[in-house]
Amino acid sequence: MEKNNELINQVSKVIGILEQYLLNDKDRPILNTLYSRYMKALEVLTNGGDIKKIMIKGGCRAYLDTFSDYMNPLLLEMDKAEKIFSQIIDCK
């Protein structure tokens, strides 16, 4: 359960960063896709849904395919979220 709370916090952090980016650039499809996936992940986590329905894995790769900005804070936070998510999935 502790890892779930850690993932909720990390997903919330990523959502906050994405919201800031979307304020400045609403027309980036990848940002909108990432935002919707992280919002869905937060919904699943907070409502006790099936964690296998979370689709945040691969978000870092998709971001890099679009932006090639390896030192972006968003990318670093998404990487943390993906790692926590992988640890939870591996334990199930």
Image (tube, rainbow, N blue to C red):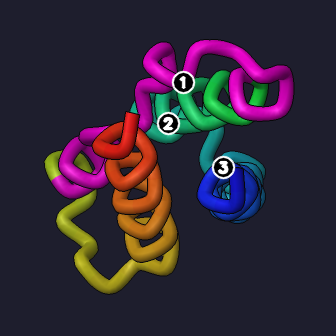
> Residue 34 has which mark?
2
Asked whether residue 50 is in view, the answer is yes
Residue under label 1: 51
Q: Earlier in the sequence, mark 3 or mark 2?
A: 3
Residue nearest the viewer, comparing 24 with 45 = 45
Image check: 78 left or right of 39?
left
Indicate the secondary structure of the residue bearing disc 1: helix
- Circle 3 residue: 4
Residue 8 image offset from top left, x and y in percent? 72, 51
Quadrant of the image containing the C terminus: top left
Which region shows up in magenta? 44-64
Q: Nearer the viewer, residue 52 or 39?
A: 52
User: Is 74 situated above or below 7?
Assistant: below
- Is disc 2 surrounded by few (<14), some (14 to 19) or many (20+) residues within 10 Å? many
The location of residue 6, given as percent across then percent down, is 67, 63
Q: Circle 3: is it few (<14), some (14-19), or many (20+) Cα within 10 Å?
A: some
